[in-house]
């Protein structure tokens, strides 16, 4: 997934396991039909459920909800690489519906939306979705079988690498009846492909008939979701308006959701300006990303008198993977020994003590906080999967648990790490000359670190200073968020502070785009580090083709272990929850979804008239 597709990460890939016996009552022996998919056991909600448990089905509708973001956009077309659509809130979620939608209190379960049910054979060689009567576009036209087939074909051929990789294992989509679409899968037995297809966003064929799908546009697109775009100020703002006659508003999956009438998105190129806008009452909710700001920035009168709420929300599942990414498209960074040497100059423990207020936990895996993360030394099935590559892999893969270089936040331990870094650089062919590390031709070791937030400059500056002590000439380059997104799309950087969205608990075909050789030179792919390694490719395929959960866990751990020992990035850290600040004007359900992501708040909260009145009476939305 590209950076901007936050919400869509929930349906990228997975593994479908057998549903309850009642799901196998289809007309053909060996064919199963159900209203839901689930990764483990049975779905929580049966075919007659009325609403999810984490919503208030009687939540009132109305009001305006305003966000302030520290970036920009130049297109409202999120399905192709060209252009920069709004980041951190996906238009796919608000404007377009998928065949099936995820539940927020199950780790990997989806329920019918555009499709009322899905059927599949025992060997998972195809999946057939029956479309729901009454599903329609905002212009009143029905969502058809032709729309679903068009969506699959256009995304697979012209969509961003995310979609091309997701649907690479699907041979074709055919009409199986007036309201049914059958997807033929290339590989029988790959249950994850069925789950992936269930997440297909459905696009209107008639709308795109006279338009070029490959080009960006700021024209509000035609959708079928709970909101439509009513106003656009390119690069600066856009407005979502709730669709009053939304065709799916009474479905069980939508009860108590999408409660706000107007959602206003305002964009500020500087993230610090977006914070000031929030504190001045020009925005209603903020997902805080800066630890110093979280620790001290909300210590204001409004935070003390209850008008402004600061809350660390709990979460389950995987975390963001944040780190310093080496771009291997640059020849300098193709040597793993050099990458490892540079990682010794990053003193996380000192940063956590002096800058992060001790709030952060060091990342040790690309699948941290889950059973998929590598742990200890490989054993059992994981060892079997790694064994064929023993001669090509770093021997430590088999003999040592992986852990990033660390210090005890003292100068003495840092010096020890820098001595180790210098040794590794010497082994990689670099020598010190006149205070600089140079190669055999006398060229200095130098590179640029691309940053998009002033906070990261505080994090990177000590790292640069440590590198200088090694004779490495690293320079910081600060750009605004819009330019950073563009440069990430085209891989125009040496090193960058980047992040990968939380991994699925059921990793599948999307792993090819994160780490696969084929994605390394596809602009817009998520292989930001430019990894081109046949061993990694083989391990990715083990993940994609895993036949059961045990195999999937072993394959993912093996992949994660090799990625970590490859030193493709320097892992940073994560916080213990989701830090959110908001003005006290919202009503909330009695419980939050277990698998919390920020976008869930948008569709389960509502504007509470009594709290709104109390807020205004107490001084309104003004922090100081």
Image (cartoon, grey):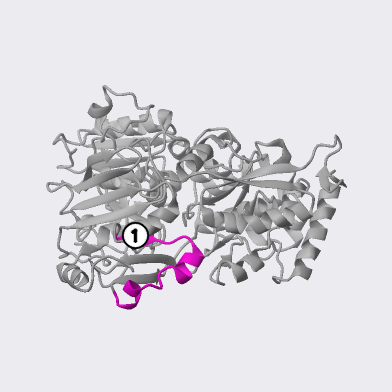
**As drawn, is 329 to the left or to the right of 547?**
right
Q: Position of residue 68 (x, y in %)?
A: 34, 53
Residue 302 belongs to the span the image colors magenta:
yes
**As drawn, is 158 to the left or to the right of 458?**
left
- Give the residue at mark 1: 278
Image point 52% across, 33% down: which residue? 523
Report the front residue among 309 and 424. Answer: 309
Q: Quadrant of the C terminus?
A: bottom left
Q: Position of residue 250 (x, y in %)?
A: 15, 54
Q: Residue furthest bottom?
A: 305
Q: Position of residue 89 (x, y in %)?
A: 36, 49
Residue 520 visible here: yes
Neighbourhood count class around disc 1 (C-alpha, 10 Å): few under 14, some 14–19, many 20 upward: many
**As drawn, is 125 to the left or to the right of 230?**
right
Image point 76% across, 45% down: which residue? 392
Residue 97 visible here: no
State which quadrant residue 184 falls in: top left
Residue 261 belongs to the span the image colors magenta:
no
Report the front residue among 118 and 316. Answer: 316
Magenta residues span: 284-306
Q: Is residue 378 above or below residue 82?
A: below
Q: Position of residue 474 (x, y in %)?
A: 70, 47
């Amino acid at each position: 997934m590209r950076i901007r597709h936050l919400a869509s990460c929930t349906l990228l890939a997975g593994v479908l396991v057998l549903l309850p016996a009642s799901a196998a009552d289809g007309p053909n022996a060996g064919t199963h039909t159900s209203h839901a998919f689930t990764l483990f056991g049975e779905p929580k909600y049966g075919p007659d459920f009325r609403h999810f448990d984490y919503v208030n089905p009687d939540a009132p509708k109305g009001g305006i909800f305003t966000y302030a973001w520290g970036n920009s956009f130049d297109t409202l077309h999120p399905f192709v690489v060209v252009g920069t659509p709004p980041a951190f809130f996906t238009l796919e979620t608000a404007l377009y519906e998928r065949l099936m939608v995820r539940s927020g209190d199950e780790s990997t379960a989806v329920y019918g939306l555009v499709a009322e049910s899905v059927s599949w054979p025992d060997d998972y060689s195809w999946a057939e979705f029956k479309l729901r009567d009454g599903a329609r576009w905002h212009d009143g036209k029905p969502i058809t079988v032709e729309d679903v087939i068009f969506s699959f074909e256009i995304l697979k051929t012209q969509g961003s690498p995310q979609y091309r990789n997701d649907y690479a294992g699907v041979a074709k989509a055919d009409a199986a009846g007036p309201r049914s679409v059958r997807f033929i899968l290339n590989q029988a037995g790959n249950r994850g492909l069925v789950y992936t297809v269930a997440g297909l966003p459905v696009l209107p064929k008639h709308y795109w008939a006279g338009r070029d799908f490959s080009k960006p546009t700021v024209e509000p697109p035609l959708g079928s979701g709970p909101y439509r775009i009513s106003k656009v100020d390119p690069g600066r703002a856009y407005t979502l308006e709730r669709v009053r006659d939304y065709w799916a508003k009474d479905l069980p999956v939508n009860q108590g959701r999408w409660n706000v009438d107007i959602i206003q998105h305002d964009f500020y190129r500087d993230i610090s300006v977006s914070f000031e806008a929030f504190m001045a009452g020009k925005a209603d909710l903020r997902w805080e990303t800066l630890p110093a700001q979280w620790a001290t920035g909300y210590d204001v009168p409004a935070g003390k008198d209850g008008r402004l709420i600061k809350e660390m929300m709990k979460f389950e599942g995987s975390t963001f993977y944040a780190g310093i990414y080496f771009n291997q498209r640059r020849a300098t960074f193709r040597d793993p020994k050099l990458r490892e040497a540079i990682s010794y100059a990053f003193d996380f423990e000192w940063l956590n003590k002096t800058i992060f207020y001790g709030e952060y936990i060091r990342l040790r895996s690309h699948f941290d906080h889950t059973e998929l993360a590598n742990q200890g030394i490989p054993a059992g099935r994981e060892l079997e999967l790694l064994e064929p590559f023993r001669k090509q892999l770093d021997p430590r893969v088999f003999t040592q648990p992986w852990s990033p270089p660390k210090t005890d936040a003292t100068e003495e331990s840092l010096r020890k790490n820098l001595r180790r870094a210098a040794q590794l650089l010497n082994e990689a062919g670099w020598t010190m000359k006149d205070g600089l590390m140079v190669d055999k031709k006398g060229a200095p070791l130098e590179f640029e670190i691309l940053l998009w937030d002033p906070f990261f400059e505080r994090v990177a500056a000590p790292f640069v200073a440590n590198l200088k002590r090694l004779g490495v000439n690293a320079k910081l380059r600060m750009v605004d968020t819009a330019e950073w997104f563009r440069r990430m799309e085209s891989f125009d950087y040496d090193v960058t502070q980047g992040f990968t969205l939380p991994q699925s608990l059921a990793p599948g075909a999307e792993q090819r785009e994160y780490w696969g050789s084929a994605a390394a030179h596809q602009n817009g792919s998520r292989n930001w580090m430019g990894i081109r390694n046949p061993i990694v490719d083989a391990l990715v395929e083990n993940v994609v083709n895993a036949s059961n959960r045990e195999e999937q866990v072993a394959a993912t751990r093996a992949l994660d272990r090799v990625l970590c020992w490859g030193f493709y990035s320097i892992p940073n850290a994560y916080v213990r929850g989701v830090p959110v600040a908001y003005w006290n004007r919202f009503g909330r359900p009695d419980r939050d979804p277990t698998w919390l992501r920020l976008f869930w708040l948008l569709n389960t909260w509502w504007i509470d008239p009594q709290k709104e009145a109390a807020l205004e009476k107490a001084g309104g939305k003004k922090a100081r």
